[in-house]
Image (cartoon, rainbow, N blue to C red):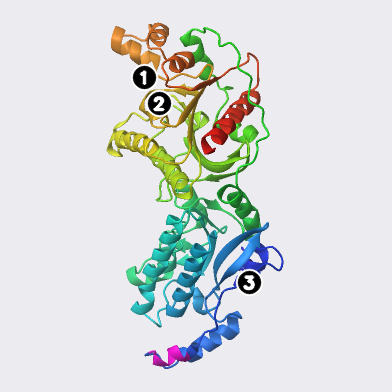
Amino acid sequence: MTKRWTAHELLDLVFDEGSFVSWDEPIDLSYADSSPDPGYRAALEAAAEKAGTDESVLTGQGEVRGRPVAVVVNEFRFLAGSIGRVAADRITSAVRRATAEGLPLMASTASGGTRMQEGTPAFVRMVEISRALMDHRAAGLPYLVHLRHPTTGGVYASWGSLGHVTVAEPGALVGFLGPKVYEGLHGRPFRPGVQVAENLAATGVIDGVVPAEQLPEMLDQALAVLVDGPGPGRLTAREPLPIGDHPAWDSVERTRRTDRVGVRDLLAHGATGTLQLRGTDEGERDSTVLVALTRLDDQPCVVIGQDRSRQTPGHAMGPGALREARRGMRLAQELGLPLVSIIDTPGAELSPEAEERAIAGEIARCIATLTTMSVPTVSVILGQGCGGGALAFLPARTVVATEHAWLSPLPPEGASLIVHGDVTHAPEMASRQHIRATDLLADGVVQHVVPEVDGESPADLAVAVAAEIGARLRSLSA
């Protein structure tokens, strides 16, 4: 059973020792005397004695590894963490102050939702909390959410679901409708396993499951990207080498090898402090695309990468993967972070299901979003660049390709089938369609080609690509 953390314990756990300063003003309980419930004031006094807090939320500011961070934390022992008018106003005030002072904000929830003793006047306060949070996000400031057991109702349906990054405790009950309420209303139990943190992470509703003990480390990773500025870089870009006149088909075959460098190699060997995000945060997840906050050669950025290792004939890159990519684009734009897109795909999903889930529209929306971004953008054709799925990640201020990377409207076999009625002319079509990195460089599609060295490891090429990305990001940011 996961430890039930109190608000004070969580503050001590997350913030550097002695750094937390409360923002809360004393509460005058006389407002409770006007409640239609004559025992409400006594209930508040008993709750305060039980919880050791004056309300169901505490707010303030502390430091996480030396970085100032504002916080809103629930105390479940105070009337099940329910949010009344005073608690809601305290949250709104803290969010507004964090925005005014330019601070990232963390919220840790544990609540049954709106306080029933106060009814609708408390219920509608969730709108004001949400309004303040969207103003905070509009200011380009990070909002990180940690969902504790349990988080339900209006809290989950407002400030618990508006984070740039959202994680939950292992085994935490997280849901819109409390299972006991559902059973009481419908006379049957809620299907088990749905409102559990692990299931929500698997289905793309939240980004992951993180024990409270690991929360300081996760926050440090996130803030290293979201708050810390770029560094000078530690990797050395590969010296320009003569690019050989390779047959296009040779490059196609090289990039299809299972030991070919991939996006995970790039993050493993060229990045630090990578925090992977999962899903669209709208209940959709597709592992063929990876979205991460990271520092590539010490340059903070959002990476959206096509993971060739997860793309198989039975699991092609579908509409959900492209929606995940667009989430990464939105994050980069909203937080003012550079965006790096990695192209490595045999093609987007071709199926009736993909058509019904708007595969063409998602490709178009990815292209449209990338062409209108104002933050620095770098696109890397790492290996296979096939069809609309590749084009969806291509538009950027700078496009880089590895020496054997390629880009084509269809796989060469498909082009051969259309032109010749068979697939045997694929090598010829690869040559005729000018798909090679050198062809793309000559046409101005690509601005730089990273040379490849025969016999080098995926790690070696990953480092060379990361170094080139870092140099391009420093140039664009300057």
Q: Relative to residue 127, is residue 406 depicted above or below?
A: above
Q: Give the range drawn in magenta.
A: 30-35
Q: Which of marks 3 and 2 is in front?
A: 3
Q: Quadrant of the N terminus?
A: bottom right
Q: Relative to residue 216, is residue 322 depicted above or below?
A: above
In the image, what residue occupies the spot 30% across and 33% down? 360
Residue at the disc numbered 3: 21
| Amino acid type for the residue under numbered disc 1 | Leu
The image's mark for residue 185 is none
Q: Relative to residue 24, is residue 65 depicted above or below?
A: above
Q: Which of 162 and 380 is in front in this view?
A: 380
**Residue 271 drawn in magenta:** no
Residue at the disc numbered 1: 410
Q: Is residue 421 visible?
A: no
Q: Which of marks 1 and 3 is nearer the N terminus?
A: 3
Res 428 quadrant in image: top left
Q: Earlier in the sequence, mark 1 or mark 2?
A: 2
| Amino acid type for the residue under numbered disc 3 | Val
Asked if the residue at tag 2 contacts the one at tag 1, i.e. Cβ–Cβ closer than 8 Å, the answer is: yes
Asked if the residue at tag 2 contacts the one at tag 3, i.e. Cβ–Cβ closer than 8 Å, the answer is: no
Residue at the disc numbered 2: 347
